[in-house]
Amino acid sequence: MVSASSPGAEETMKSLVDDLLVRDAAAHARAIEWLANLGDRRVVPHLIEVLMIHEIGSNWDRFGFPEVLRDHSPPRYLELPEARWPGALAALGTIAEPDYDSPYAWVEWESWYSQEEIEPLEGFDEWKLQLYRSYLPPVGRLLDAEPRTFDLQDVRWGNCDPSFLAACNEPAFVPGDAVTAFDGEGEGGDESGVANGAHTGARDDVERYLKSEDVVFGFIVNNVAYAVPQWVLFPHELANVTLKGVPLSLTYCTLCNAPILYNRRVGDQTLTFGSTGMLLAGNKIMFDEETESLWSQHRGVPIAGEYLEEGVQLEVEPVSQTTWDEWRETHPDSLALDIHTGYDFDYRHYEDNIGFFRYYWNDESAIQPGLRTAEGDLPEKTAVYGVTSDDGETVRVYPVEEVPREGVWTDEVDGREAVVVRDATDDVAVYEAPPASLERDGETLVDAEGNSWRLEPKVLVREDGRELPRIPGRHGLFFAFRSQYETVEIGSDAN
C-alpha cells in the first residue's frame, strides 16, 4: 500500500486532491478514501474546505444561512449531486487527532483547524480558488480578486452568498410613531391601547412592529434621526441607503455583534456594498458592486482588488446601539425602517430570536469561523466600543459595561484629549475634550471654569456656541478588534 513516505506519494496526493474538484461525487469518495489511507496532515485544509460545502449542502434545513431561508430550497449549486464529498468527516478523524461525533462535528473541526498551523500541499491557493469557482460560483468570483492582503487559507465560507444574504437596498423610512407597537393596557400604553408618545392621526398604512425593548441601530443625518431594528437587519447584515442626499451603508457583522455605519462615497464614486458570504478571522468580508473589491467590514478598508492599491478608508459615522424606547425618548421625531422592505424575508423569525448567535456572542468556548484565539487584555466576547487612529491601524477600546452611566471618563485617543460617556440613549460616545477637568450634570458636562457643554449626538456644544466634534467609533466584541487591527489599546479613565 502507498504511504505518505512512499516514492511518488507527493504527486499521488496532489492528483487525489485534484480529484476532489472533478464533478463526480463517486470520484470524490474514492479520492477521500485514498487520502485517509495516506494519512498526511497536509491534506487537512483541503478536506476542511470540502467538508463545509458537503455538510451545508446536505443539511441546508439545519445549517443554511440566513436561518430564515432554511425553509427555502438551497442555492441550486449546493443541490447538485456532484457537490458532495462522502467520507470527508471520517477521513479527518483518521488523519488528525480529534474525534468529533456530534451533529455539529464539521463546526468543531473548523474551530480546531483554525487553531492549528497546517501547511497545505503546494498549489493550495489555486486549488481553493478553483473549488470556490466551481462549487460556490457567486462566492468564488469574488474571492478571485487581486491584489490581496490576506492568505487564502484564512478565508472561510460563511454558509451563504451575496444573493441569499442580500443587502437591503434603499428601504423606506416612516415616522417612528407609525411603527411603534401597541404595548397594551398595563404594559406601557393607556387603556385605549395607544402606544406611549403616539400622535393622533398616526399613519395606518404601515405595520406597527417596533416594541419598546427592541434593539435598534440609531443615527443622525442632517439633523434627522433614523432607527433600524437589529432583528430586521439580521437576515441582510447590510443596508445601503441614501438619506438627505448622503449615501450610507449600515453594515452589521452578526458574528461580531458589530453595527458600523459608513459613508459609501469614495472620491467621486458612490459605492454599493454587499456581503460576499465569506469571513476572515470571524469578521464578514464585504464587496463593492462597482469594482468587486473586497473590504473589511470592521475596519472599512479594502483588502483585495482595485481599491486596495488606492489606500482608501471609508468614513465612519456615529451609530448608537440601544433600545427603541431609549432612542425614541431622546429622538421623539425619529424615523424608523418600514418593515415592508420588498424582500421575501420573514423578519419575525428573528423577533426575540437571535438564534445561535447568542452562543457566539456569549460563550467563550464558541469560536467564530476562521478565528485563532489568543490571550488578550479582555475576554474575547467582551462588548466594547472602539475608536481608531487616523491611519486606522490602532484602535482604543472601552468595555461598554465599565463606562459609567452617570460619570465621565477622560482619556487620550490618537494624541487627542477625549471624554468618554454614556449618552442619552445609554450607549458609549467619545468626544474631543474641553481643555479642563470635567464633571457630569445630567446631559451636560461642566468644566473646571464653570462652562457647560451640552451632549449632542455629533458634537459637544458650549453655552457660547463653541463645538467639539464626536469621535466616531465602532461597536463589537473584543475579538473583532484584537484580530482586525495592528495595535489594540484598552482605554480607561485617566483621572
Image (tube, grey):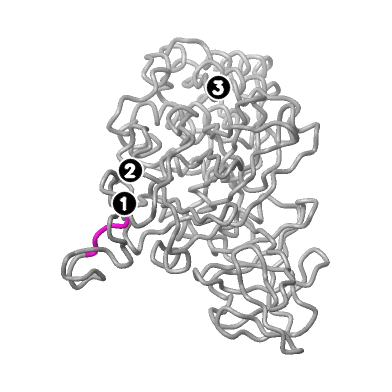
Which residues make up the magenta segment?
179-183
Residue highlighted by disc 1: 351
Q: Secondary structure at mark 2?
A: helix
Mark 1 or mark 3, which is nearer the start of the sequence? 3
Query: Which residue is disc 3 drawn over?
Result: 132
Q: Residue at x 46, y 27 (%)?
A: 163
Left or right of residue 164: residue 249: right
> Which of the marked residues, 3 or 2, is nearer the chain's N terminus?
3
Query: In the rendered structure, are the residues bearing label 1 and label 2 in contact, judged by CB atoms less than 8 Å apart?
Result: yes
Relative to 444, is 388 above or below? above
Q: CA distance from mark 1 to mark 2?
A: 7 Å
Determine which residue is flagged by label 2: 347
- Residue 402 at x, y = what percent? 57, 76
Would residue 388 appear left or right of 127 to someone viewing this image? right
The mark closer to the camera, 3 or 2, is: 2
Q: Quadrant of residue 63?
A: top left
Give the left or right position of residue 238, taking residue 340 as reference.
right
Nearer to us in this view, 277 or 329 = 329
